[in-house]
Image (cartoon, helix red, strand yellow):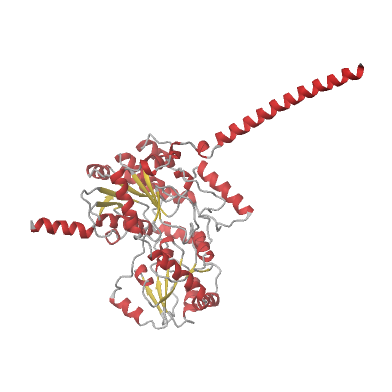
């Protein structure tokens, strides 16, 4: 009896379910993408589910990346035609693109993502393992450049949950109005000019009709022959869409019950810092500035860029924590005394320290929400992808200032730091956003886990709109418009014919009367 009581108490305290489901996570092999998937997975683990994550066995430091409570299922890469996202070749290419030395290749980025999926699906040992585990649900990264992870759901005949910071609403048949909802590739707000609305609508329609991310259809035909495109496969298998951004950084927009927004999925109350870092932060009586450009760019910035940062920071009294995890051509000789270089940062915990006064960021979605959650203003240096849009929305909402990594001067950075720290509007705006985020009834992680539980228990039919069964022309009401135009034309033609006949008869009658 005591044992039963103890077990019941543990189940109650941890929020475990009566039944445990097996859930598989699959995403793009980029640390920030894998992190947000695992945040959802960690919350599901606390609810008693068994959570696994797909990861390349060659992924660097994968043992440290995988969170406690989540089991890694590895696949082996045998066929590599394109560099992998974490490879030195890919990193050098990305930095060259950032520095303007070569054009960005969207196609290459998509091919790199598809390469992971191809290796995963062609690894017979891996596929036998995930088949034998009999998963109940797949949670996949819906990243635009790499839509192929959903193929596992089709192959395993299980439903899927879409998780991403980017979302083309019409693909999920959400009635988005492009006149007030900008795409993340543009520096537009919800108050667009005529030309901006025209461009946004044209690209929105074009992106929906013409699928620019439809690469490696051979992989699709081989492992999911029932679908003609990756978008169609997503629509067939996805039961829930989880989006990691909302109106606090974007702008309000309509959504359906099967679209759940969880802003700040990587945010949480600040945890205990490592001893040396805690001592450093506690001693920062004039405040601390955190600088991080994320995990994708292994910061191979040229010496002149690093020198400008050091020059600016040497003029400040604040302590600067600078994440520098890359290989540099030549490190500047003189590192300012107030600058501390670290290869890894507990970013959320640092931003939550009471002495942190500013976050200098590349404008990744997760980092921006972490900064808002802790009420820390920002200076953004967008580097690639949707980060330009993210920097624009940050400025538009009054959370910080934007700068150009190629053109900034040290004095300009110093002036902007003083402006953000001294003008109260930035702190007030971020503190208000922090209060709103913290006032939510559930955390982002728990909200995601609740809705995943919901569809596991109740299915998703009651959450989905009938528009999912419509073709695009029906969804856009083009058939209705065509019908109205045809009816209007025919009605006009009939009325014109009747009017002509009547007029002719009247004219004939008048002519006869005159002749008499």
Residue sitting farthest toward the left: 1
- The structure residue drawn at horizontal position 47% and vertical position 77%, both measured from the top left corner, is 310
Give the residue displayed 27% in from the left and 51% down from the top: 74
Q: Position of residue 435 (x, y in %)?
A: 41, 68
Q: Is residue 205 left or right of residue 93?
A: right
Q: Quadrant of residue 136?
A: top left
Q: Residue furthest top?
A: 516
Classify the position of the N terminus by image quarter: bottom left
Please tell me in which quadrant of the rendered image residue 283 appears.
Answer: bottom left
Taking the spot 36% from the left edge, 74% from the top edge, the residue there is 353
As drawn, the residue found furthest toward the right would be 515
Foreground: 272 or 258? 258
Which quarter of the image is occupied by the C terminus? top right
Task: Using residue 487 as the reference point, say whether residue 472 is left or right of it.
Answer: left
Identify the residue at horizontal 9%, vertical 57% (top origin): 3
Q: In this rendering, does residue 80 appear at all? A: no
Foreground residue, 376 or 279? 376
Q: How many marks?
A: 0
Q: Is residue 374 visible?
A: yes
Camera-side residue of 250 and 76: 250
Query: Residue 234: image x %, image y %?
Result: 40, 42
Q: Position of residue 490 (x, y in %)?
A: 66, 27
Q: Nearer the viewer, residue 493 or 291?
A: 493
Q: Quadrant of residue 273?
A: bottom left
From what the image shows, is residue 26 above or below residue 395?
above
Locate residue 346, reporting x and y percent: 34, 69
């Amino acid at each position: 009896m005591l044992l039963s009581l103890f077990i019941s108490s543990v189940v109650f305290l941890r929020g475990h379910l009566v039944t445990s489901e097996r859930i598989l996570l699959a995403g793009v092999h980029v640390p920030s993408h894998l992190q947000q998937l695992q945040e959802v997975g960690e919350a599901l683990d606390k609810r008693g589910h068994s959570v696994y994550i797909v990861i390349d066995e060659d992924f660097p430091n994968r043992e440290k990346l995988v969170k406690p409570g989540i089991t890694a299922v590895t696949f082996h890469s045998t066929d590599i035609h394109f560099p992998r996202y974490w490879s030195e070749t890919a990193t050098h290419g990305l930095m060259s693109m950032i520095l303007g030395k070569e054009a960005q290749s969207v196609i290459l980025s998509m091919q790199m993502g598809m390469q992971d999926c191809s290796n995963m699906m062609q690894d017979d040992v891996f596929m036998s393992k995930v088949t034998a585990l009999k998963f109940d649900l797949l949670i996949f990264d819906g990243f635009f450049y790499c839509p192929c992870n959903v193929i596992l759901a089709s192959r395993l005949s299980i439903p899927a949950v879409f998780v991403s910071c980017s979302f083309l609403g019409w693909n999920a048949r959400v009635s988005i109005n492009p006149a007030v909802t900008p795409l993340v590739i543009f520096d537009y707000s919800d108050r667009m000019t005529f030309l901006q609305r025209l461009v946004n609508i044209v690209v929105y329609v074009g992106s929906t009709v013409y699928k620019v991310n439809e690469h490696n259809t051979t992989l699709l035909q081989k492992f999911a022959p029932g679908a003609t495109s990756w978008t169609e496969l997503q629509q067939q298998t996805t039961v829930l869409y989880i989006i990691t951004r909302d109106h606090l950084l974007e702008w309000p927009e309509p959504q359906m019950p099967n679209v759940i927004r969880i802003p700040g999925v990587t945010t949480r109350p600040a945890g205990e810092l490592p001893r040396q870092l805690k001592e450093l932060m506690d001693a920062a009586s004039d405040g601390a500035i955190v600088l991080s450009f994320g995990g994708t760019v292994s910061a191979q910035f040229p010496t002149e860029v690093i020198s400008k940062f050091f020059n600016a920071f040497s003029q400040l009294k604040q302590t600067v924590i600078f994440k520098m995890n890359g290989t540099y051509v030549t490190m500047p000789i003189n590192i300012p005394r107030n600058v501390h270089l670290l290869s890894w940062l507990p970013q959320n915990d640092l931003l939550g320290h009471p002495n942190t006064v500013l976050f200098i960021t590349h404008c990744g979605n997760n980092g921006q929400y972490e900064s808002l959650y802790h009420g820390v203003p920002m200076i953004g240096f967008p580097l690639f992808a949707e980060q330009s849009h993210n920097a624009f929305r940050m400025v538009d909402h009054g959370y910080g200032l934007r700068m150009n990594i190629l053109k900034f001067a040290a004095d300009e950075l110093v002036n902007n730091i003083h402006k953000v720290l001294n003008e109260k509007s930035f702190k007030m705006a971020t503190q208000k956003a922090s209060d709103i985020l913290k006032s939510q009834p559930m955390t982002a992680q728990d909200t995601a886990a609740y809705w995943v539980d919901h569809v596991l228990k109740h299915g998703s039919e009651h959450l989905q709109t009938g528009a999912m069964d419509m073709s695009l022309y029906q969804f856009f009401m083009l058939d209705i418009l065509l019908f109205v135009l045809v009816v209007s034309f025919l009605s006009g033609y009939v009325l014109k014919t009747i009017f002509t006949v009547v007029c002719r008869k009247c004219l004939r009658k008048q002519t006869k009367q005159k002749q008499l």
